[in-house]
Amino acid sequence: MAPGDFAVHPAGGRPPAEVERLASRIAEDGGAALAVYREPVGGHWQIFALLPRAMVHPTPYQRDLSKAHADRLLRVIKKIDRFVDPVVAVRSADGYWIPNGNHRLHVLEKLKADFVPAIVVPEPEVAFQILALNTEKAHNLKEKSLEVIRMYRGLMEEDGRSHEEEFTFQFEEPHFITLGLLYEKNARFAGGAFAPLLRRVDKFLKAPLRTAYGTRQERAGRVEEADGHLKGIVEKLKRRGISHPFVKNFVLARCNPLTRARKTVPGFDQALTKLIEALEGFDAQKIRQEDIARSAVMAIPAAG
């Protein structure tokens, strides 16, 4: 398809000049802009295209590739012998970034496909919003937190003056930012044990991203300090022969300063100070294996 030679949705009218230029750029890159159309929700202009696979890259912010998920996807696509799920792409300096579809791109690379079917969005900033909607593979807490902190740095590099609280849609939950810093430092960090507390006290900051990032590092440091005390307690329990997968959750539940907080929840700093004090004073000698086992059973959600 020659540059500028693309189909336009009959109800769409003439696309803006910048969209036409993007369609031509796709052709110049060796791809094909197959159709320019208005998507049906907001009426925004988009391009359905075949992009040269060598020019398509995942954004630097999203989670790491899951080999197990990629292998399953490869088997399915091989079985049906066709690719039916386009990725979303935005133009970048070195080609095209996909904020979702990293596993699909990996499969196309494995199959040595020359082109990637894609919906190309003209507005690059939409990539950050699409990351928040990525449901190709359900995130676990670690994956989501790492994705958010990478996105955070990307936005900070683009415009560090924008306030953190302006990106609540992209980040979803403020504690993901703090946990992301911790997971980067320690991939085996017990984020699931700390998440219930952090979800209640960690709020979005009313400060520019560059300033807020320093506060996030301080908050991560406080959680890391609490985790150090928690590890010490777990070691004491192990020496007494007490070992259980729920032990960290049990200890944190016993030390949680929010247990009796009903109407007024303390701020992050106050809550972490109280948590650390409680961990420092925790008496591991009073804990029995059956106490932890009973708490673990009670923590299981009821069926239905």
Image (cartoon, rainbow, N blue to C red):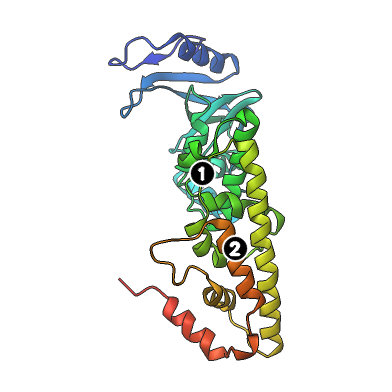
Q: Please, is residue 227 above or below residue 59 in the view?
A: below
Q: Please, is residue 264 above or below residue 205 in the view?
A: below
Query: Viewer-proximal residue, 282 or 193?
Result: 282
Query: Viewer-proximal residue, 277 or 289?
Result: 277
Q: Earlier in the sequence, mark 1 or mark 2?
A: 1
Snapshot quadrant of residue 235? bottom right
Q: Which quarter of the image is occupied by the C terminus?
A: bottom left
Taking 59 as reference, is 119 left or right?
A: left
Outermost residue, left side = 11
Disc 2: which residue: 272
- Within 10 angstroms of label 2, few (less than 14), some, or many (20 or more) residues? many
Q: Does residue 60 show up? A: no
Mark sitting on residue 4: none
Disc 1: which residue: 171
- Within 10 angstroms of label 1, few (less than 14), some, or many (20 or more) residues? many
Taking 17 as reference, is 25 left or right?
A: right
Snapshot quadrant of residue 260? bottom left
Amino acid carrying label 1: it is Phe
Taking 165 as reference, is 45 left or right?
A: left
Amino acid carrying label 2: it is Leu
> Residue 217's spot in the image, x, y percent?
67, 50
Q: Residue at 55% x, 18% y: name it.
A: 26
Query: Viewer-proximal residue, 6 or 268?
Result: 268
